[in-house]
Image: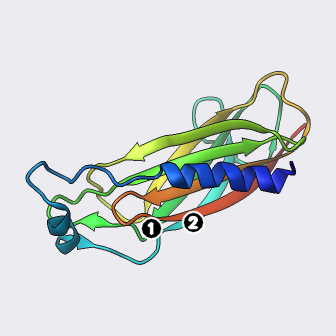
């Protein structure tokens, strides 16, 4: 199976798993949620970047050493906001493919965020640990974000190299 097909399959599995959460409160019905939301038609991943750093993102790069940490940061906008509570419902899935085309990391719901936000867009950070046996070559990270209230998603890929 080729690398692109594996990635598509993994993302499809994550999309199938992307489900609608419980209403914001037990007394709030689904129809009330629809009436009390700012519901855009799309969700958008933007500003996808890679950083190196031991404890936090420090230096923007796409070239990493074996046994190092890859920090993946991005912004999300265009998500549903529950007006009454200020809450959003986002789920992020992450897949990493190695130079041989194998999925070496598949993390459904690495982030499941259902909380109040203070600003738009919302920024997130993922940490990917490269082991000492990481193969040299080009890797691909695939990020999928899903709006849990509106069931729309966006996906982006970013490549990095390990030397």
Image spot of residue 2 (x, y percent): 87, 51
Q: Is residue 4 visible?
A: yes
Q: Distance of mark 1 from mark 2, alpha carbons?
A: 8 Å
On residue 119, the disc is: none
Quick one: quadrant of the C terminus? top right
Q: Residue at x 14, y 60 (%)?
A: 29
Secondary element at image label 2: strand
Q: Residues within 10 Å of mark 2 (few under 14, many from 20)?
A: some
Q: Are marks 1 and 2 in contact (CB under 8 Å)?
A: yes
Check disc 2 and report the residue beneath it.
Answer: 46
The disc, 1 or 2, on the residue closer to the chain's N-terminal end is 2
Image spot of residue 101 (x, y percent): 85, 44
Q: Quadrant of residue 107?
A: top right
Viewer-side residue, 161 vs 82: 82
Q: Quadrant of residue 158?
A: bottom right
Q: Residue at x 17, y 68 (%)?
A: 31
Viewer-side residue, 129 vs 80: 80
Q: Residue at x 66, y 35 (%)?
A: 128
Farthest residue to the bottom: give it: 41
Check disc 1 and report the residue beneath it.
Answer: 77
Q: Is residue 61 visible?
A: no
């Amino acid at each position: 199976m080729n690398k692109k097909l594996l990635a598509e399959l993994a993302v499809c599995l994550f999309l199938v798993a992307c489900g609608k959460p419980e209403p914001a409160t037990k007394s709030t019905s689904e129809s009330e949620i629809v009436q009390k939301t700012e519901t855009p038609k799309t969700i958008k991943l933007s500003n996808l970047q890679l950083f190196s750093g031991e404890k936090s993102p420090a230096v923007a790069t796409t070239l990493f050493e074996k046994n190092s940490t890859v920090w993946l940061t991005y912004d999300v906008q265009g998500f549903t906001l529950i007006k009454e509570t200020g809450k959003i419902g986002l789920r992020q899935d992450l897949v990493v493919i190695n130079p041989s085309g194998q999925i070496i990391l598949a993390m459904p719901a690495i982030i499941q965020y259902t909380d109040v936000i203070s600003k738009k867009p919302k920024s997130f950070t993922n940490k990917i640990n490269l082991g000492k046996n990481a193969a040299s070559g080009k890797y691909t990270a695939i990020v999928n974000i899903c709006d849990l209230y509106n069931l729309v998603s966006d996906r982006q890929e970013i490549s990095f190299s390990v030397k």
